[in-house]
Amino acid sequence: MKNIQILTVLAVLLLSTVLVYASGNGAAEEEYDEDTYGPKSPIVWVKPVKSVVFEHKIHTMGAELDCDSCHDDLFEMEAGAAEENDDFTMQTLYEGGYCGACHDGSTAFASNTRCTACHIGVRGHARLIGEVVGEKEH
Amino acid sequence: MKIDDLEKIESEDISNLPSAERRAFLKLGFAVSGMYLGGSVLSLTSVRNAHASGGVIPEPGKYPYNPHYSMVLRERLCIDCEQCKDACVKTNNVPSYGFRTTILEKRRSLGGDKYETIFMPVLCNHCNRPPCVRVCPTTATWKDEKTGIVVMNPSRCIGCKTCMAACPYNARYFKEETRAVDKCDFCLESRLSKGKITTACVEACPADVRVFGNLADPESRVFQLVHSPETMVWVLRPETGAVPNVFYINS
């Protein structure tokens, strides 16, 4: 009898934890505040190559960076301003510019690794803006 | 049976066999083994350029052509910017509905809900045993004797599309403008024959994914990439036995 009581208590505890966790996640989803965390929609650069994606959410909410970690030192606030610069290249990143300030292999994964984490390509870009990619998916 | 009786019986060993019978038996043996021998000699001659048995990478010095043109794709560097595709379209007048080279996309689980994307450039593999060449009823496509490039003669093509069905790599398309099948020729017509040493896609690639060269030359970069130690080298659909010349590596 005692065993059953203990089991019941445990089950209730487990269930409530799961519920709290789930609702917490849900709340976080709703609580995304553009003033705090930056624009919700991803930034997509198409120069010098198509196409590179940047998500504020992953970096501010996820990695807990402040706005002034990157603005206006590494990037201007205006979306797409960086890609107008001639030095917006992988070489600059390797030398610690732009994304390379953190993506250096110690703070975050190095700029010369995991290419497709940011480079979503022509196909990824088309999917992002809702275009149907012509070929069959494999 | 007693020893005396046994000695009277005719021996069953070959000393008592009539020579005519022995000859007939030997003839039969020669005929059977000759037939097998003949068969294996015939099959040897027809596949003398094939190297499928020892894995997908041919042994150095056993490349059937010189220059033996081949391409190495450093797959993990591809970012699907598609500058190779654009360059190919421009160089070889490829219409919008077809392609000579394209980029495919794979998704690999990293555990949890995380995935990584892998972009896979594809093109004609210029196989040593090209199924497309084998099936063409008008010999409109063949392996160039000097370079091993699988080439097309559009004027000889009747548009039956059998080669398209035979190709394991989906590397052929029917070009309405010429009413013929069109495919990658490693830029033989548009560039190599005019003295250039690389293809348009290789020249356009900003990430150094595509490496083109002569596999028969140990000094070439393709040779060194394919034969470098501790490198994973693979080809697409090796089970077809087509012995492709486009190699993929991950370093």
Image (cartoon, coloured by chain):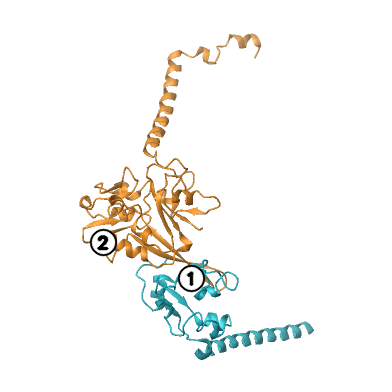
Q: Specify the colour of chain A.
A: cyan
Above or below residue B172? Residue B66 is above
Q: In the picture provided, is B15 more to the left or to the right than A14?
A: left
The residue identified by callout 2 is B93
The structure residue drawn at horizontal position 39% and vertical position 30%, both measured from the top left corner, is B38
The x and y percentages for residue A17 are 66, 85
- Numbered badge on residue A21: none
Give the amino acid at mark 1. Answer: Thr
In the rendered structure, the residue with mark 2 lies on which chain?
A: B
Q: Quadrant of the N terminus of chain A?
A: bottom right
Q: Specify the colour of chain B.
A: orange
The structure residue drawn at horizontal position 35% and vertical position 49%, both measured from the top left corner, is B131
In the rendered structure, the residue with mark 1 lies on which chain?
A: A
Q: In which quarter of the image is the C terminus of chain A?
A: bottom left
The residue identified by callout 1 is A92
Give the amino acid at mark 2. Answer: Asn
Above or below residue A99? Residue A19 is below
Q: In the picture provided, is B154 more to the left or to the right than B218?
A: left
Residue B208 in which image quadrant: bottom left
The x and y percentages for residue B232 are 52, 54
The x and y percentages for residue B71 are 40, 53
Above or below residue B103? Residue A23 is below
Q: What element carries label 1?
A: helix
Residue A68 in which image quadrant: bottom right
Q: In the picture provided, is B92 more to the left or to the right than B113?
A: left
Mark 1, residues whose alpha carbon is within 10 Å: few (<14), some, or many (≥20)?
some
Outermost residue, right side: A2
Query: Marks 2 and 1: same chain?
Result: no
